[in-house]
Amino acid sequence: MPVVRDLRVLLRLRNFRRLLYVRLLSQGADGVYQVALAAYVVFSPEKQTSATAVASAMAVLLLPYSLVGPFAGVLLDRWRRRQVFVYGNLLRALLATATAFLVLGHVPGRLFYASALCVTAVNRFVLAGLSASLPRVVDVDRLVLANSLSPTAGTLAATAGGGLAFVVRLATAGSDAAVVLLGAFLYLCAALASLSMAPALLGPDRCPARPHLGAALAGTARDLLAAVRHLAASPRREAAWALAAMTWMRFCYGALLVLMLMLCRYALSGSAEEGLRLLGLTLALSGAGFFAAAVLTPWVVGRLGPGRWIVACSTLAAVLVPALGLTFTTGPLLAATFFLGLITQGAKIATDTIVQAGVDDGFRGRIFSVYDVLFNIAFVGAAGVAALILPPDGRSTALVALVAVIYAAVATGLYRFERQRDRDSEGRCFT
């Protein structure tokens, strides 16, 4: 198969492999840590969790990154990205260890959330840096393929990390602290793996006229406005449209995630432990969908183009979400989980490719940080909307219908843009 042959070629690139190792270890640790948080916040037997509580937890953990994100972008365009991976993962290992001791000490919830907030705050730098670094280790011709393999492999690593967390939790009689310590160990391994790359390998290139850090932070707003103008310029309008489409798709994914959490906790299970096991199966099927997207997307993008692949993904979601979700039964919902994994990851691969190919290297860190901020705002906004709509057991026809309408609107808007872009291209060819 051509995809398999291309993957073998890509994996023979030494620096790509090294960057991939860092991603796998880092996101594997994220998966472990996220399962520990979910088990502690949502599936503790002594807690009666509501959709409002889930939304509040997401807001506490994600909304502050709307402030951190822009600064992350400015720093990523000035700091050595390899150093961000080394020190960022070391810091997360220390913070995760502290979180484990807080869990053991049964401290008040606000202290636990503050510690978790610090761990995931550093994640903004690491994930944005991984995306911005990818064009430094592969050539342009293989960028689509690299975007299929690398982020998807990271997502699969997070899924595997989540599965490993379930195993450790079972082996330690439900100890959330042991699971958090496992995440700390994997963060440490990610930091050590980063040392295999040269400090200057991942960029950004040094500029003699670059201002000092204080001046750079003071000019954050100006830098971000420049990045937005760069993104909005005519040759890069497709990147702006792709980001907007992916943001709304992220909103849909967040709303459905809260719905599925509540269904697993109450409507589809008889106990917290049974609900947690069902959530584990859901994550595994979602991971299988991510893997399918990694295999399918390069082939489809080669024929349709990345923009039209996003249109196809959002159209498929608009049809499948009500067809499978409105049953509120385990089998169809698990099938929907697989297809949503494929759809969401397929659209993300295409979006990453459009943005990476359409913007200059000096702006990539800032634009991917803006991308990350949009993701967080959409995700928290979706959780808030879900909290307003969902009943206690999670069964909500209105929320499923709203998500389907948004997917359809995304498909329609992006399809019209692609048609207009094609007409403009044809007009330039005839003049």
Image (tube, rainbow, N blue to C red):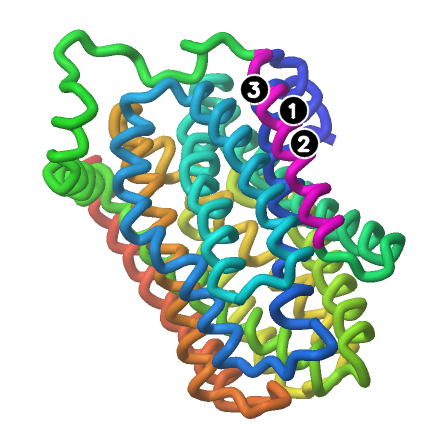
* Count of picture labels: 3
Local secondary structure at mark 2: helix
Which tag is nearer the camera, tag 1 or tag 3? 3
Residue in the picture at 64% in, 25% down: 21
Helix, strand or loop: magenta stretch: helix
Residue found 18% across the figure and 40% down from its top: 224
Give above or below for 287 relative to 396: above
Q: Marks 1 and 3, Cα distance to the nearest angstrom?
A: 25 Å
Residue at mark 2: 3
Q: Amino acid at mark 3?
A: Ser
Q: Position of residue 153 (x, y in %)?
A: 65, 38
- Front residue (pair 99, 190): 99
Seen in the picture, residue 161 relative to 312 is either above or below; the reply is above
Residue range of the region highlighted in magenta in the rendering: 177-196
Q: In the rendered image, which residue does mark 3 sit on?
A: 194
Q: Amino acid at mark 1?
A: Asp
In the rendered image, the residue lying farthest to the right is 171
Residue 324 is a magenta residue? no
Q: Nearer the viewer, residue 181 or 344?
A: 181
The percent coordinates of residue 301 (x first, y second) are 51, 42
Distance, label 1 to label 2, CA atoms, is 5 Å
